[in-house]
Image (tube, rainbow, N blue to C red):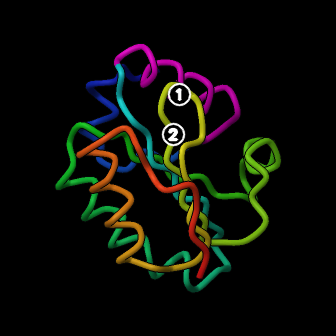
Amino acid sequence: MAGLEEMKKAKVVKVESEDSWNLFLSQASNHGCPVIVHFSASWCVPSLAMNGYFEELALNYQDILFLLVDVDEVKEVAAKMEIKAMPTFVLMRDTEVLSKIVGANPDAIKNLVDSCVQSTTVPQSESV
């Protein structure tokens, strides 16, 4: 498995299994690294449309771990995280959910990332 530094170099890291999910969260927590997760599905056009934007954010915010979870490929993680709609973006720190955004809203996601960088106080959730 890749170390945290290798994961950061990959920009957006695709989660392939529940085991890799647990490993990524554990390593991020050990390094004090916040995590932003894009829960997506290959059939969901808004999710696919957000992929490029999510990649761009990952390039610009090197101190945050960006994960991509396909809800159909890693159903256990989607169920554990109570994902009901795609796309859903989740901000986590120390394996705890700090905020959740449901819907393809680039401005809200950018605000979420900025708030993560500027402070540990983050809005609870926002839906579109």
**The label number, if any, that marks residue 25 in the structure image:** 1
Is residue 86 a member of the stretch shown in magenta? Answer: no
**The label number, if any, that marks residue 92 in the structure image:** 2
Look at the picture and state if 102 lies above or below 74.
Answer: below
53 left or right of 51?
left
Look at the picture and state if 114 lies above or below 116.
Answer: below
Locate residue 4, reporting x and y percent.
34, 24
In depth, the one of 90 and 2 nearer the eye is: 90
Q: Residue at the location (61% across, 70% down)?
A: 102
Is residue 24 a member of the stretch shown in magenta? Answer: yes
Look at the picture and state if 95 lies above or below 48.
Answer: above
Locate residue 94, reporting x and y percent.
50, 25
Q: Residue at the location (23% across, 46% down)?
A: 118
CA neighbours of label 1 inside 10 A, class few (<14), some (14 to 19), many (20+): many
Q: Are marks 1 and 2 in contact (CB under 8 Å)?
A: yes
Q: Residue at the location (49% across, 48% down)?
A: 91
Q: Give the magenta part as a residue range.
A: 16-31
- Mark 1 vs mark 2: in front: 2
Quadrant in the picture for the C terminus? bottom right
CA neighbours of label 2 inside 10 A, class few (<14), some (14 to 19), many (20+): many
Mark 1 or mark 2: which comes first in sequence?
A: 1
112 left or right of 68?
left
